[in-house]
Image (cartoon, grey):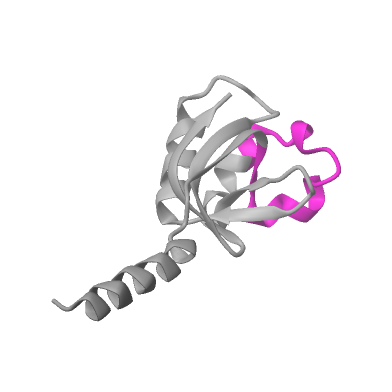
Amino acid sequence: MSKRSLLTAVMLSLLALPAIAAAETWKNVPLIDHNCVNKVKADPDKHPTSCLLRCAKSGYGVLTSDGTWVKFDAKGNEEALAALKATTKTSGIRVTVEGERSGDMIKVQTVTID
């Protein structure tokens, strides 16, 4: 490989780095289903666990500190539902989520109830 080809390859890989998403963590954020996000946005800690379970098919997400609801991918929905089924909390479900945000969706790695 010539020096020029090598330099070109290195430069192209450096340009691609910003496109690689880095994992983020959202700590102690309210878990909210899509059906209820507008109803409970003002006081998410009063949202009952039973409602989160009933509305599972609508999908889950979190309410960020700036008031934006960010939805989960399919894996995140599965993990959130499993965590909800295992919890004894009756309302005020807050979670810690690790994953990669892309626009209005998080590609979830883990969801744990706080």
- Number of callouts in the render? 0
Give the image location of residue 96, x and y in percent: 56, 33
Closer-to-camera residue (33/98)? 98
Is 33 in the magenta? yes
Q: Answer with the quarter of the image where residue 12 lies.
A: bottom left
Give the image location of residue 53, x and y in percent: 55, 41
Closer-to-camera residue (109/43)? 109
Residue located farthest toward the right when viewing the structure as drawn: 42
Give the residue displayed 69% in from the left and 28% down from the top.
91
Give the image location of residue 75, x and y in percent: 40, 50
Q: Answer with the quarter of the image where residue 44 lies.
A: top right
Q: As displayed, is residue 108 above or below residue 86?
A: below
Give the image location of residue 65, x and y in percent: 76, 42
Answer left or right for 2 relative to 16.
Answer: left
Closer-to-camera residue (39/25)? 25
Give the residue displayed 31% in from the left and 77% down from the top.
8
Give the residue displayed 59% in from the left and 32% down from the top.
95
Residue located farthest toward the top when viewing the structure as drawn: 88
Quadrant of the snapshot with the C terminus: top right
Answer left or right for 2 relative to 80.
Answer: left
Quadrant of the snapshot with the N terminus: bottom left
**Highlighted magenta segment, given as a residue range:** 30-51
Residue located farthest toward the left when viewing the structure as drawn: 1
Give the residue displayed 67% in from the left and 36% down from the top.
29
